[in-house]
Image (cartoon, rainbow, N blue to C red):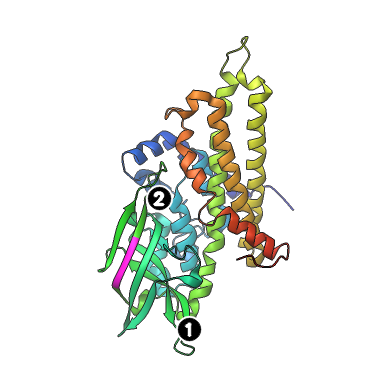
Amino acid sequence: MTFDLTPEQDQLRDAVRALGRRYGHGYFVEKAKAGEHTTELWAEAGRLGYLGVNIPTEYGGGGGGITELAIVCEELAAAGCPLLLLVVSPAIAGTVLSRHGTEEQRKRHLPGLADGTQKIVFAITEPEAGSNFHRLGTVARRDGDGWLLNGRKCYISGVDEAGHVLVVARTEDSSTGKLKPALFLVPTDAAGLTRSKLDMEIVSPENQFLLYLDDVRVPADALLGESLDAGLPALFAGLNPERITVAAMGAGTGRYAIERASGYTATRKVWGGRSIGSHQGVSHPLAHAAVQVELARLMIQKAATLYDAGRDLEAGVAGNMAKYAAGEAAALAVDTAVQVLGGAGMTTEYGVATLLGAVRAGRIAPVSREMILNFVAQHVLGQDKSY
């Protein structure tokens, strides 16, 4: 057992950290409040190869794994630039295409994902079903040599920045008549696909949308994989990378908040010329938050290592635990940072209150802390299913 990164992973961490700090949280907030996207940061990260670290080399990627992509997510977040589309496009779509796409689909989409010139977002959540794919109402039916898609999706990130959306729908199995999940690569400008922006109380340059699919016709090769049988394994292929990279983003955000707060409390002097950080009422909450973030980072590293080793079932448990731990730690770290900074913590200038909405959402999405506890109770502790 080792907790050391390889020399290549160390170099990646240092390089991404340097890139993130050149842009910084001020850039992130400025873009968000102007209703703009982090286009420059994304493009540079793509040119430098950071967006495609987990994509096979034959498609222009770095040939690494989720461990490397988690490093990218964490270090950008630690610089104050938590980019949700890193989770959606390289982690989910990139992994699903790499593992289950046809060769033509991989050649068409993976190089663009790797260099940042293409983004593919992911649409599973629905107003009535949440993320429960057993209750999905979006249905795909055969229409000549293509497919017709009808349904609604909600909380779909970054549709306005993407060329395609990976839509999870249900199709009828001709042999059984039962509905089964399938994934479709749908152009975001397809006829019948419309969107409505959701106003969120989150400071982020990445937007959330409702999607409406009304007789959206796509060709046969829009179906991900060689057949309908690819749908279920393709769907699950994206879940572990999603949880691990979301957790990494949360851990990075927690590190950022603690660094900002620690720098302030070590130099701020009020009572008798001593720094406020010398008082345990200030330092202990920060130290506690730092411990929680570091524990989450260890679980993230374990989950990513298991996933990259092909141990999917174990990675599923570790990935869920990592996401839970990082969500709690990030929320604690940001809230603690705001508290120890006092009034300064609520200002835009000090750059921590701007993250309150995002870290609170991290305890809800992409899977709530309660559903993770249900998962652990059932699959680790052997308890009966509660829902």
- Magenta region, residue range: 211-215
- The residue carrying mark 2 is 47
Label 1 secondary element: loop
| Depth check, front residue: 384 or 20 | 384
Q: Do the residues labelled 2 and 1 touch (CB within 8 Å)?
A: no
Q: Which residue is drawn at 37% across and 77% down?
A: 140
Residue 266's place in the image compared with 296, above or below, is: above
Q: Whole-percent x and y of residue 252?
A: 55, 42
| Depth check, front residue: 269 or 82 | 269
**Residue 200 appears left or right of 338:** left
Estimate the spatial distance between the alpha carbons at disc 2 and disc 1, rounded to whole Å: 45 Å
Residue 306 in view in this figure: no
**Residue 109 appears left or right of 358:** left
Kind of residue at disc 2? Arg
**Residue 151 appears left or right of 92:** left
| Depth check, front residue: 280 or 30 | 280
Label at residue 178: 1
Kind of residue at disc 1? Lys
Q: Which residue is drawn at 40% across and 69% down?
A: 107
Mark found first going from the N terminus, 2 or 1 = 2
Q: Whole-percent x and y of residue 265?
A: 58, 23
Q: Whole-percent x and y of residue 333?
A: 58, 37
Q: Whole-percent x and y of residue 326?
A: 59, 47
